[in-house]
Image (spheres, rainbow, N blue to C red):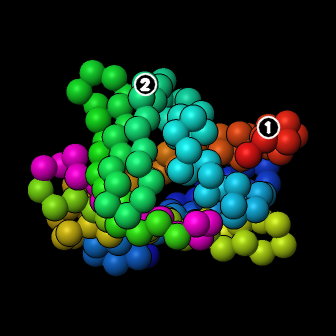
């Protein structure tokens, strides 16, 4: 049950770990303050720049986010490829919780926790599925791509820092 994969880049490591029959946990240290990392997760114009892994040839066509408790989000990657759900908890700059409702039945719930230490942020993302079968069906493919996504997030945050934005 302790299946674990790691994505190594020059400075960072993304760890994907199956925590239980129903939970997948992804961790990464980001070289930016939690406030800026939170902005990259909650502002559509920033999120669109890093979320889709380049190696998959996907593009996030539209990104709608109403980041408040009860607010909804919808991510569209083109024809019939939508991801959507609702925000259950929004605590800037340390925590976001949202549902993943595109599957039709009870979907997974994602919790993003950000903990800042010395100007860097420990990011812990937890995917809790309604059953072991749901997690088995989802596999770890999307979570495995997060190493590349977080590399892209690092690139975006580096460019924002050097440009004095956010």
Above/below status of 37 relative to 158: below
Q: Are marks 1 and 2 in contact (CB under 8 Å)?
A: no
The mark found on residue 1 in the picture is none
Asked if residue 65 can be seen in this view, the reply is yes
Work out whether residue 65 or residue 159 is closer to the camera in this orientation and state it: 65
Quadrant of res 164: top right
Asked if residue 58 can be seen in this view, the reply is no
Q: Residues within 10 Å of mark 1 (few under 14, many from 20)?
A: few
Residue occupying the far left of the picture: 105
Q: Quadrant of the N terminus?
A: bottom left
- Sequence-wise, which precedes: disc 1 or disc 2? 2
Work out whether residue 108 or residue 22 is closer to the camera in this orientation and state it: 108
Residue 24 lies in the magenta stretch: no
Residue 100 lies in the magenta stretch: yes
The mark found on residue 61 in the picture is 2
Label 2 residue SS: loop
Residue at the spot x=34%, y=40% of the render? Answer: 74
Above/below status of 71 relative to 166: below
Work out whether residue 91 or residue 108 is closer to the camera in this orientation and state it: 91
The percent position of residue 165, horizontal first and vertical second, equals 78, 41
Residue at the spot x=58%, y=66% of the render? Answer: 92
Horizontal relation, residue 141 to residue 162: left or right: left
The percent position of residue 55, horizontal first and vertical second, equals 54, 30
Number of numbered discs: 2
Q: Which residues are magenta?
A: 92-104
Horizontal relation, residue 119 to residue 125: left or right: right
Circle 1 residue = 159
Horizontal relation, residue 79 to residue 54: left or right: left
Label 1 residue SS: helix
- Alpha-carbon span between mark 1 and mark 2: 22 Å
């Amino acid at each position: 049950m302790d299946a674990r994969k790691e994505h190594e880049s020059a400075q960072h490591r993304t760890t994907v770990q199956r925590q239980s029959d129903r939970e997948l946990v992804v961790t990464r240290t980001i070289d930016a303050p939690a406030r800026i990392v939170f902005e990259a997760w909650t502002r559509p114009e920033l999120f669109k720049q890093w979320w889709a892994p380049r190696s998959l040839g996907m593009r996030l066509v539209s990104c709608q986010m109403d980041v408040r408790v009860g607010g909804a989000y919808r991510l569209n990657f083109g024809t019939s490829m939508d991801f959507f759900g609702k925000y259950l908890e929004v605590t800037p700059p340390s925590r976001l919780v949202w549902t993943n409702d595109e599957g039709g039945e009870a979907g997974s719930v994602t919790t993003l926790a950000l903990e800042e230490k010395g100007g860097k942020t420990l990011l812990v993302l937890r995917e809790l599925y309604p059953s072991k079968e749901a997690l088995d069906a989802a596999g770890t493919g999307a979570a495995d791509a997060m190493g590349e996504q977080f590399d892209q997030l690092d690139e975006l945050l580096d460019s924002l820092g050097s440009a004095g934005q956010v």
